């Protein structure tokens, strides 16, 4: 309740349009036209509220306007998230071709340990998404840089605590019941990911800062360039220098820092950020307790979702034949994660669109944006699910050459397809919640669906009825389905 109260206090003051104390800079972006690439559209609101025009014509015109605004955001955002995920996935592929043990270790390190930090950092960074989006819509540009700095300070401090957990990953995995051989190999992989913790701490606030201003193309170009460098370095370090799992994870961390530095240089030097980034300020250290409360609510919302997948991976490592179970589940969850990045891109676009429209005082536009982004993301997810089903017998060979793993993945694919379709809707609705500042509500929904239904069901069927990895996919699908229905309400 405390988080919700502080969240309301922080966000409601940003909802009103700018007043005389916050005038629009002379050459700053304005709102009100469909060609405006910077968020809210007064034209969309006027179309939706004009009752003299027939409903069907209003729907058509509003859809055209919203699609232009949305795709301007979603296209590059999806590209950024997918490229970043491909970077992580390629590291897992390089590791997997060293052997099945290395694939299981990289899977446990990526999905069992790394996602712990990813969920926490991305969740805390969502506070920037809420506040920067609403501040930008209300023309309070100077506050965006302050929010960016506050978030980075909090996330860096959190990163120090996470680094300690990473350092003790081997005894933690053994304590959780993982096999000694897999725990040893996974811990080596995790040690190389310690610098990546601080990549998250800097990168997520920067991305949210830029997205709130609808500046997404530069991040896409930087991510594409970094991915090319990452693939070359991974090949050299893993295969030519023979540094194995540790080398693969160190290259992933190094590549992350390339993106962070490049994006920050863009912010400092770009004319587009001249009103939102005015340099470092001591004001960033004020209001940290209140900002921490909103960040905590955001973190709980996303962590409950991402940690759920982490727990499923850890449970898979405790099944009979843990190496096979981890390999099969790893392939499916990696593919799911890659497709999930599309929904996360739409999540970011939905959050920016909703927060910008609310900040500009356009409630009908915000509601209409929710409908359009949900429909578009759902259609794309269904198409991808059909393609995955058609390729079910060949998917695993991207990651490993084992035929046993290929057969297990083929059996899991129908459940994977269901998960992909549901993942096309649920993250988008979460993005809408972030744009509105409703992180606490989504946290309650996630607790009920993932932890009261999903994990107990997965453990019961996996151990009691010996259904193995297949039941984990069932638990994922059922939990996402319930979560989606509740967020729709």
Image (tube, helix red, strand yellow):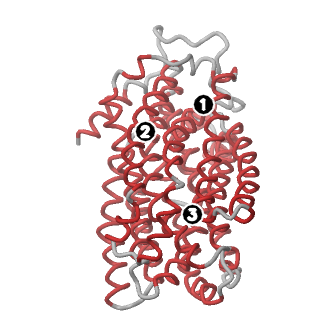
Q: Tell us which disc is closer to us: 1 or 2.
A: 2
**Circles 3 and 1: CB distance less than 8 Å?**
no
- Which residue is at a point 32% across and 47% down the rendered structure image? 440
Horizontal side of residue 299 vs 435, given as left or right? left
Q: Where in the figure is residue 104, as x and y percent of width and height?
A: 53, 74
116 in relation to 321, above or below: above
Q: Secondary structure at mark 1?
A: loop
88 in relation to 53, above or below: below
Residue 365 at least partly seen: no
| Image quadrant in which you'd find residue 47 | top right
Callout 3: few (<14), some (14-19), or many (20+) C-alpha neighbours within 10 Å? some
Q: Mark 2 or 3 closer to N-term?
A: 2
Q: Where in the figure is residue 430, as x and y percent of width and height?
A: 46, 51
Q: Secondary structure at mark 3?
A: helix
| Image quadrant in which you'd find residue 66 | top right
Which residue is the site of mark 2? 155
Which residue is the site of mark 1? 213
| Image quadrant in which you'd find residue 113 | bottom left
Which residue is the site of mark 3? 337
Q: Nearer the viewer, residue 64 or 145?
A: 145
């Amino acid at each position: 309740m405390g988080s919700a109260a502080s969240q309301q206090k922080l966000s409601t003051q940003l909802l009103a349009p700018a007043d005389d104390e916050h005038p629009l800079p002379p050459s700053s972006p304005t709102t009100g036209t469909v060609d405006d690439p910077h968020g809210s559209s007064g034209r969309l609101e006027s179309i939706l509220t004009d009752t003299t025009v027939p409903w069907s014509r209003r729907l058509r015109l509003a859809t055209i306007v919203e699609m232009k605004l949305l795709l301007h955001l979603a296209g590059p955002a999806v590209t950024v998230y997918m490229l970043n995920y491909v970077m992580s996935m390629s590291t897992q592929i390089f590791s997997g071709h060293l052997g099945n043990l290395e694939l299981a270790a990289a899977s446990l390190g990526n999905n069992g340990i790394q996602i712990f930090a990813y969920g926490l950092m991305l969740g805390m960074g969502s506070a920037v998404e809420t506040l920067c989006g609403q501040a930008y819509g209300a023309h309070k540009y100077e506050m965006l840089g302050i929010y960016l700095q506050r978030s980075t300070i909090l996330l860096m401090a959190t990163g120090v605590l996470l680094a300690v957990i990473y350092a003790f990953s081997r005894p933690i995995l053994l304590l959780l019941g993982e096999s000694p051989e897999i725990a040893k190999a996974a811990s080596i992989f995790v040690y190389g990911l310690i610098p990546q913790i601080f990549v998250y701490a800097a990168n997520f606030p920067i991305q949210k800062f830029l997205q709130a201003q609808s500046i997404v193309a530069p991040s896409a170009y930087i991510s594409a360039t970094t991915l090319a460098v990452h693939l070359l370095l991974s090949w050299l370090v893993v295969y030519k220098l023979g540094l194995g799992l540790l080398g693969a994870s160190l290259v992933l961390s190094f590549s992350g820092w390339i993106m962070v530095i490049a994006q920050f240089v863009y912010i400092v030097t770009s004319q587009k950020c001249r009103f939102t980034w005015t340099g470092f300020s001591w004001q960033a250290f004020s209001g940290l307790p209140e900002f921490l409360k909103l960040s905590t609510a955001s973190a709980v919302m996303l962590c409950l979702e991402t940690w759920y997948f982490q727990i499923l991976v850890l449970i898979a490592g405790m099944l009979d034949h843990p190496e096979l179970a981890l390999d099969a589940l790893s392939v499916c969850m990696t593919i799911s994660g890659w497709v999930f990045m599309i929904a996360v891109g739409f999540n970011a676009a939905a959050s920016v669109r909703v927060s910008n429209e609310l900040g500009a005082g356009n409630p009908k536009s915000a509601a209409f944006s929710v409908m359009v982004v949900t429909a578009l993301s759902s259609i794309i997810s269904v198409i991808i699910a059909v393609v995955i089903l058609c390729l079910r017998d060949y998917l695993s060979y991207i990651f490993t050459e084992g035929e046993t793993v290929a057969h297990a993945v083929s059996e899991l694919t129908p459940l994977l397809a269901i998960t992909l379709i549901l993942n096309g809707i649920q993250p988008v609705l979460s993005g809408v919640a972030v744009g509105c500042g409703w992180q606490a509500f989504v946290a309650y929904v996630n607790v009920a669906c993932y932890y009261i239904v999903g994990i107990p069901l997965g453990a019961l069927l996996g151990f009691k009825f010996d259904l193995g990895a297949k039941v984990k996919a069932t638990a994922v699908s059922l939990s996402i389905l319930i979560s989606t229905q509740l967020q729709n309400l």
